[in-house]
Each structure stands twice: as structure tokens, then as C-alpha cells.
Amino acid sequence: MEDPPAEFGECSKDSEVAPALIAVHPSQDSVAVAVGSDLRVFDLRQGGAVSLEDNSSSGSLHKDSIRAIRYGANGKLLVSAGDDKVVKVWLTESWRCITTVCSEKRVTAVAISNDGLYVCFADKFGVVWIVKLDGLDGENVVIKKADPMLSHYCSIITSLEFSPDGKYVVSADRDFKIRVTVFPKKPLDGAHEIQSFCLGHTEFVSCLAFVCTQEYPQGFLVSGSGDSTVRLWDIPSGSLLNTCEIGEKAGLLESNDGETECCSAVTDLCTSLDGSLVAVAVQRQVPEYSLLQGIVILNCDLSSRTLSHAKVVSICGGTFIPTSLRTCSATGLLWMVTGVSDLHVSEHPSLARVRVISGFRKSNPDSHQHEPLLLEDNELPAGTKLLEKLQGSLSYSEEDFLAAAEAVKKAMSNLLIKKQYSAENREFRKRTRNDKKGKP
């Protein structure tokens, strides 16, 4: 007897692939890339690869795909977490794991408070947990227990951020919502005061970032979504200030079939230090191998509360569809990675490609003098030595990256687009709901 066909949105082996992630130290002292369960770090001060030291009882770094990596605001800590239900906190001075936290569910997002005292992480059930980083000597691994802080009620949380002033923790989910929660004085007792909801996206919210300047130190929120938009929000009120359609501009980027019509999901974004620019990574949700290569750069004018198209940076020389973006405020470099883990159709089950764009801190991207420029591999900090560590190899075939891009697109659809069940399936699920068991 044949198995019944999977409903749209049900998990398959494609949903198990994990996109490559990148994180950059605030002072660009180091760069980290996660591919599958492999966490790779390159020390730019010493000019060499980092050997991570993990003496925890697990006996290994991570046992399953890493879904989130994040440096703290002062660069002293790096946090990694993922599908193995483990959160690890690394001390960047020694690259030693100083604490391990076990999660009840798979982890989807992490954030570190601005003072470095707390780590928050979200799980696939929609709960945000918090851990206080006290009692750590930097020498021995301390097993910490997390406390629940807030919940999105069974919706996958996709992004987690602290506001620049530390007053709020902002969380986004698969159900189009952005929640702004007051960060309490005693966070281990829970965060019960909701400041606002930012509502307006019509598809999953994939990423969050803040823009702030000396004139606006409290900052404004920018969000990206599967609805092909980037939106600017006022945090305290939750008011939508401006919407920038990315899909139309994304059609100008180079694709390998020449089509211009597309439906584009924003997969990641980051902002420049001066708050004037937003870099946007786009995944085109169109037929197989019709893929987008490059990023969109937006102008952000906080005085007029507007977002506008500035430039399209096309990345030539092979398939490159960014899966993660990060910027370094100290250097104005925009770091990008594309790649995937558990790629079954390739001889390289895990692969990554790192590219860097310079000039991402200029307030006038339309000036030719300060135009964002894609760096060649030999122009990168530490050059090919860095790439050998972070990528694992200096070269992969074009077919490998085409397959990786398609796998990421399918995995995103399976994970973030809500399931649509048939009428028969819906009735069956109603009859077998756990919350009805035991009721008369």
C-alpha cells in the first residue's frame, strides 16, 4: 500500500536542510560561520583558524544543525544553538564553552542582552526562554537551566532582538506577527507586559533589525517578510511608518533564466552603523532554478521615516543566493554567506561560500565614489586562508550551489509557510487533538 501524499507544508527531508549562517564580531576581530552542526571560526587578529574547546558532558560541539549564531554587543560572547536542543555560550577571548543550556524543543533564534548578562532563545513551539549568565569563571563548563519568559502560542519564532536601549525584547513569528515586550527588571520571573504589536505583514516575518542614529538613539525597527516587503516601525506604539516593496526591485537582479517576474521572500537583512542603509537578502519563490543572485540596498531616512531603493548589488561569477548577512560597524564591510547542510544530491553534503561587500557605512550610496563594491577573494581580510576555514573548500561546482539554493528555498517553504490541510485531514486532526483527550 502506497503512503498517502504529503500535505502542502508538511515536513520532508528538504525541510531538514539548514542554511549556512554568518556572524561577525563587532570589531571584526573574528568571523563565525555555521554549516549544519559545524561551527567554524576564524580569528582575524591572529590570522588563523580557531579551535573551539568544549568540555561539556555532551562530548561534542553540536550534534545537529545549528540554526542561530550571535555575538554579544561587546564581542565577549558568542552563542550558538539549533536542532540538537542545546544552547552553547562561548567566551571569545579563549574560545572556550563556558555554559551549556538544554532546551525542551529545537531552537530557532537567540539574542544576548546589551549588558551581556542574559541570553534569550526561542524554540519551535513559540516559547522564549532566558538564562542569566552569572557564576561563570570562564574555566569550567556550567550547566544552566532556562526559565520561560514569554510565548507566541505555538507559532515558530523566526527572529529575536533586544532594542538598542535595552528596554524591549522584540520577537517575530511565522504567523505574520511582531511582538514588542517590555524587558522586565526581574526577567527570570517572566516578561508579562506587552508594549505593542507590529502588524501589517501578510506572510511570515523572517528577520528583524534596528536602525538608530545620534538623533534617534532609541532606534526604529525594520522587518523583512515572505510578502516581499521591508517595513519600518515605531517600537513603542507599533505603528507602521513605511513599507518598501522589494519584489519589483529584486526582479532587476541577475537570474539564470532571464525572467523578470518573480515573487520574492526577504530572508535576511542588516543595517549600517549610521542607520542610513539596509541590506536585504532575497530568495525568489519561483519555478526550479529560477534563482536570484545578489542583494538589494535600501536608503533609510529616519527624519522622514521612509525606506527607499538605493542600489542593487548583483553578484556575478557563479550562483550566489545569500542565506545570511552581517555587517561590521568598525569597518563598513557587509559579510554574506550562502550554503546548506545535509545536501543529499551533492558529493559535498555541507557547503558554504563567503562574499564581502565594502562601503556599507556610507550615508550616500548613490555617490560613485562610495559605491558598495564586491571584493575579490584575495581582497578579503586574511584572503584565501580565511575562506579555507569558513568554507571548508575554496571551490565548489556550479551544480552544487544550484542544488543548495533550491534545497534552501524548499526548506523555507516547508518550515515557514503555514500548512494547508484537506477538509478530511482537518476533521481527523480535530478528533485527535491532545487538549480534548480525557474530556467528557
Image: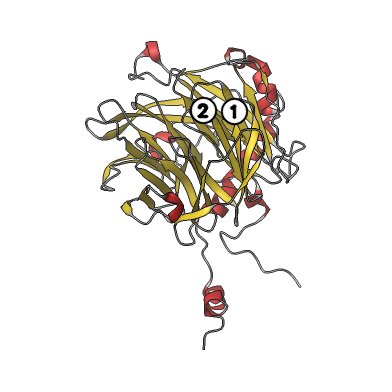
Identify whether 411 is placed above or below 21.
below
Say which of 427 and 314 sits in front.
Answer: 427
Provide the secondary structure element on which disc 2 rests.
loop
Neighbourhood count class around disc 2 (C-alpha, 10 Å): few under 14, some 14–19, many 20 upward: some
Q: Is residue 221 left or right of residue 34?
A: left
Q: Residue at x 60, y 25 (%)?
A: 93
**Marked residue nearer the N-terminal end (1 or 2):** 2
Please name whichever residue, 164 or 96, is drawn nearer the observer in this view of the structure: 96
Residue at 60% from the left image edge and 44% from the top image edge: 81
**Callout 2 amino acid:** Gly
Which residue occupies the extreme left position in the image? Answer: 304
Viewer can see residue 256: no
Residue 402 point in image, percent of width and height: 64, 36
Q: Residue at x 63, y 64 (%)?
A: 6
Task: State the SS at label 1.
Answer: loop
Q: In this view, does 336 lie to the left or right of 311?
A: right
Check whether the beta carbons of the residues at disc 1 and disc 2 lie within 8 A of each other.
Answer: yes
| Kind of residue at badge 1 | Thr
Residue 100 found in image quarter: top right
Residue 92: which disc? 1
- Where is residue 251 drawn, in percent x and y? 44, 35
Category of crowding for the residue at label 1, using alpha-carbon neighbours closer than 10 angstroms: few (below 14), some (14–19), many (at least 20): many
The spot of residue 243 in percent (x, y) is: 31, 41
User: Picture coordinates of residue 381 (x, y %)?
Assistant: 58, 15
Q: Mark 2 points at which residue?
A: 75
